[in-house]
Amino acid sequence: MRVTFVTSGLETGGAESVLLRLLPAMRAFGVESAVVSLRSVGTVGPLLQARSISVLALGMPAPASVLFGLRRLAREVRAWRPTLIHGWMYHGNLAATAVASRARLPVVWGIRQSLGSGPLDKWLTRRVIDAAQRRVRERFGIRHTTVQLDPEDECPEEFRIH
């Protein structure tokens, strides 16, 4: 199986650290991974590359560069021919969805965020989060979601939806 991960960026952070641990571990299950950062390779990109994971940065810092960046992402996906595309973080999820639908590939959304950081999010990020929540609720018929993390749990990626 080949998976292209599309992420907002690769600067040092919790979600990026999870990606750094996850992708090498997935090899044991026969999963080959590549990472596309919408912005730069950041600090985590070279660490992924040192683990023989392909990393591409699209350099999309401004909204004006989105169309060019999505076209380039679509070309890269066609060339690498993944089995599926995995969005990583909100903007990565939207880019992955846009490209996956045209390429007729399955898409998986992944969101890692500190709980309670909503007021600190940028305006556009907040709109993306709201749109993502509406889409999930509509698709799965969920009226209200609460994500609970067990602070004693060694694997904080595991959660329950109530």
Image (cartoon, rainbow, N blue to C red):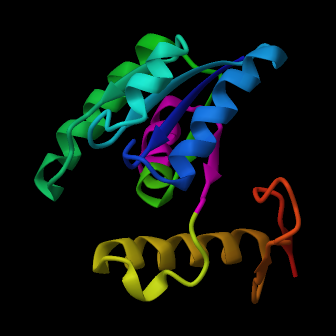
Relative placement, left or right, of 58 versus 79 is: left
Q: Position of residue 67 (x, y in %)?
A: 21, 44
User: Could you say where residue 88 lies in the image, as x and y percent from the top left?
Assistant: 54, 48
Q: Count all numbered tags in the image, as a single digit.
A: 0
Q: Decide if residue 81 is on the left or right side of residue 45.
A: right
- Point 14% across, 55% down: residue: 62
Q: Quadrant of the N terminus?
A: top right
Left of 50 or right of it: where is 3?
right
In the rendered image, which quarter contains the C terminus?
A: bottom right
Instruction: In this rendered view, identify the residue nearer to me: 135 or 89.
Output: 89
State the residue at coordinates (88%, 62%).
153
Q: Residue 21, relative to residue 65: is it above or below?
A: above
Location of residue 36 (image quadrant): top left
Q: Is residue 97 magenta?
A: yes
Q: Is residue 33 magenta?
A: no
Residue toward you, 133 or 115: 115
Residue at the image point whose x is 51% and y is 55% from the top: 89
Give residue 71's quadrant in the image. top left
Please provide percent x and percent y for residue 116: 57, 84
Residue numbers of the magenta segment: 95-112
State the image coordinates of residue 151 (x, y, percent, origin top left): 82, 71
Q: Please give left or right for residue 29 compared with residue 97 in the image.
A: right
User: Eyeballing the image, is 11 above or below 81?
Assistant: below
Q: Residue at x 68, y 76 (%)?
A: 138
Front in this rendered view, residue 81 or 150:
150
